[in-house]
Amino acid sequence: MTRLRKSPSTFTLLLPILAVAGFAAVVFAAARSPVGVSGREVGAEISNLKPTVLVVDRTLAKEWKDVGATPASAATDLQVFRRLSLALFGMIPSLEEIRSFEADTRPDRLDHWTRRMLADPRFNDYFAERLARMVVGTEGGQFIIYRRDRFVEWLSNQLKDGVPWDHTVRSMLTQQGLSTDRPAVNFVAAAINEGDIDENKLAGRTARAFLGQRMDCAQCHDHPFAVWKQEQFEGLASFFGQTKQTITGVEDMPVQNGVQQEYKVQDRKTLKDRVVEPRVPFHPEWMPQEGSRREKLAAWITHPENRRFERAIANRVWGFVFGKPYLEPVDDLEDPKDGETDMLDVLGTEFREKGYDLRRLVQTIVSSKAFRTSSEPPAGADEKATHLSECHWAVFPLIRLRPEQVIGSMLQSSSVQTVDYNSNLLFRLIRITRRSDFVKEYGDFGDDELQLHGGTIPQRLLMMNGQLAAEVFEAGFFNPTSRLSVMNSSDEKCVENAYLVCLTRRPTAEESTHFSGRLKDLKGGERRKAVEDMMWSLVNSTEFSWNH
């Protein structure tokens, strides 16, 4: 690959200041807690979680046996550690974290580190953003009445405080007030257009996000392929028919100026408005008799017998950590069948019985054999057998990293210490602004984030010749390139650390020999430039941009 060298930018010139500010933290890196700001561990005790993981693994094993799929061998602990960091933080682990992880000699260290990572504030923030995309999308909306940033922050706090998912969903569906004062109200405020609430948008998003059902096509006519009818969609939209945007925010107003507020649609045949009463598409007996329309809808959606609710979030979270959902499409699942159970039922039942704990759900999935198998097909498997194993989660799926995972990993590679809440404030500010700019240029997946996307030529050019790629590894005082070039006992050690920083693995013998030969006998600036080129090459390798 040919590399274009650029003149130093403000970010490059600031690197020495940032590095000096964080130098003391680097010196004592081994003593730093990887748990995060609070230092507490969150999640199920390993002994309490194992029975559930065992059921999940048995379900997988039965599926593999039924279809004749051969599971891949187990992945290495370091490979799983990289997957965990990408899934829970949106970035690869730092060299500091890798050293701490490898120093942990417990045989079940992956379980302990999973709990630690779930307690890290980075998990709250990253998963909050993923959940926000599911429920409100990525559009900024009307800033005065809709604040997506407040909504994401609220979701992050819900995760931090361990609020059950069903409570969180009920808050989104029922909250009233101003978007700034009561952040949950932004779920409804996101559907406000020119002062009016779009009931159809809310109905469609509610069904997709919380039930895993795509009812949007029934908005104008009966669904041509599914069971959904137009009257069912209209009945769902009617639950939001008394919700209005006022000067005091979002409010439920059954009566306004002495007039009963009803949801009305125009009849296509008569062209006259007709009143639509609130109606749920199935199991109306789950809906309580008391409460506002939105409160009744929220109670119905989160009803303990509503398998769609728990299956929908189990499928989403599986998609968040693997890169693709267990069943596709993620928002158009088949109706659950009476008397039949699958993986989503196993996870959903556990989720409900353990208090709708999202952390526990994540912890269960990443502890499964599916998450901890190798991404390499079983030895000797032909193309048909490999495809069979891939379709049934017997091989860890190879998925392109999401845009924010790419930039998060690039920025983490620019520091040997962990980029988190303990990082220098100036570095964190630059990281936030640079991430936003990069994601826009790279191409945001938007609401359809769990659909598989192929790479593009502009993306590769941005990685190879973009300003950020040049800045991250440009040799400078105290940045990782300079430190790796001067602080290692040998050329081989320098190459090894570069691979750990960029790819979370050690080089093969051939790779070590190749790059060590390029570093041999180089001193000063020439050596720093050689290390810079090596790290740039690793970040621009195909391996860097994939989960594996």
Image (tube, rainbow, N blue to C red):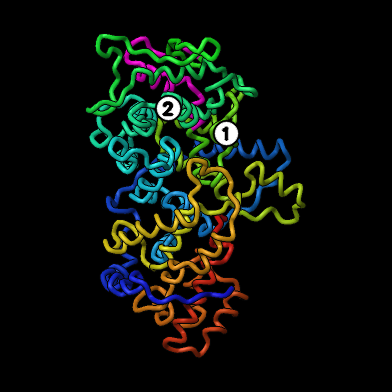
Residue pictured at 56% horizontal, 40% vertical: 325
151 in relation to 491, above or below: above
Quadrant containing the C terminus is bottom right
> In x, y percent, where is residue 159?
34, 40
Mark 2 or mark 1, whichever is nearer to me: 2
Q: CA distance from mark 2 to mark 1?
A: 29 Å
In this figure, which residue is indicated by the disc labeled 1?
343
Q: How many marks?
A: 2
Residue lying furthest front: 271
Residue under label 2, please give it. Answer: 202
Instruction: Determine whether 309 is above or below 528 in the image.
Output: above
Query: Disc 2 vs disc 1: Cβ atoms closer than 8 Å?
Result: no
Q: Position of residue 380 (x, y in %)?
A: 75, 55
Q: Is residue 132 above or below residue 102?
A: above
**How packed is label 2: few (under 14 Cα within 10 Å), some, or many (20 or more)?**
many
Q: Residue at x 34, y 69 (%)?
A: 11
Q: Earlier in the sequence, mark 2 or mark 1?
A: 2
Going by the numbered disc 2, the residue's amino acid type is: Leu
| Left or right of 232 in this view: 482 | left
User: Which secondary structure class fits the magenta region best?
Assistant: helix
Report the magenta residues as a range. 283-312
For numbered disc 2, what is the local secondary structure?
A: helix
Residue 93 in the image, given as x and y percentages of width and height: 43, 60
Is residue 73 magenta-colored?
no
Does residue 213 appear to the left or right of 278 in the view shown?
Answer: right
Tell me the quarter of the picture where residue 485 sits: bottom left
**Side of 545 relative to 158 (left or right):** right
Q: Residue 87: where, in percent of width, then height?
A: 47, 49
